[in-house]
Image: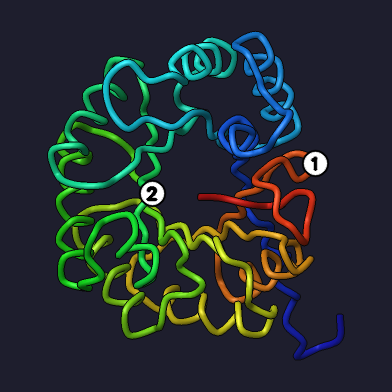
Amino acid sequence: MTAGESPEEPERLPRISDATLRDSAHMAGVEFGPDDAAAIADLLVRTGVELVEVGMVSGPDSKDADLVLATHEAVGPERSMTLLVVRDRRQVARALDEAERLGVRHIMYSIPTSEQHAQLKLDSASPKFLQALARSAISQAKERGFHVTFSGEDGARTPRERLVPYVEAGFAAGADRFRLAETVAQLSPWQMEEVIADIVAIDGSEIEIHSHNMLGMAVANSLAAVRSGAQWISATVGGIGAATPRSPSCSPRCV
């Protein structure tokens, strides 16, 4: 290094969460039991994965309870995260009750943000309704002491004027992290950089990308998101996830 030159900043590596033990439910021919979950979770943590996402909870008596408990036993609840489905405020309360019963510490809310998905799953495409629902769900979880990641399901297809206020509302309600889900893969890496730049500009934001591989761009788009400021990548082992007509698997992928 010559005089006047400044040392290069060290490369910022993304933090990794792994959704194999959740997304496996969406792939035909793949089914894990509690022993499988414990072994896979242990191996993932040994490789450096920070959070192992396991199971999906929408209310009492979750069918994934055994997987969640086995993962907690293997790596501890602090290294585990469970997805909670969001449909209405009362349903969220029931899901949080179940998460507490299972000893979950980290939750990830699945909330559809595009007009198409919101209308289909929430029976309303209203941005105000979407923001109010997210604020309520996040506030309820924070009051109970959960670490909260909230998603933008189909977020990559959600227009900026709809997505940014939603993300702002979520962080204002106390959320810890936002996950952009490229549920319907359609972005190029440079388009992904633009979408991520809009949301990393929000004060106090911590951003995760969860991309699908229908167009073969999941890895490229995940790296583009990190280049644009995302701190986390959500992935799966070997592309386990929902099959599509154009791709046998999606990795990284997400609801």
Residue at the (72%, 82%) spot, across then down: 6
Q: Would you place residue 77 above or below residue 140 in this image?
A: above
Q: Establish if 143 lies above or below 105.
A: below
Most foreground residue, 26 or 180? 26
Cβ–Cβ under 8 Å for marks 1 and 2: no
Q: Position of residue 77 (x, y in %)?
A: 45, 22
Q: Is residue 251 left or right of residue 151?
A: right
Q: Residue at x 79, y 50 (%)?
A: 248
The residue at the point 36 percent across, 66 percent down is 113
Q: Amino acid at mark 1?
A: Gly
Where residue 29 sits in the image (x, y, percent)?
73, 29
**For the residue marked with disc 2, what is the amino acid?**
Ser
SS at badge 1: helix
Please give the residue where the numbered disc 2 appears in the rendered image.
110
The percent coordinates of residue 220 (x first, y second) are 75, 69
- Which residue is more in the foreground, 195 or 95? 95
| Residue 27 point in image, percent of width and height | 67, 38
The N terminus - image quarter: bottom right
Left-right relation of 79 to 158: right
The residue under label 1 is: 238
Residue 211's image quarter?
bottom right
| 150 relative to 204, above or below | above
Residue 207 against residue 201 in the figure, above or below: above
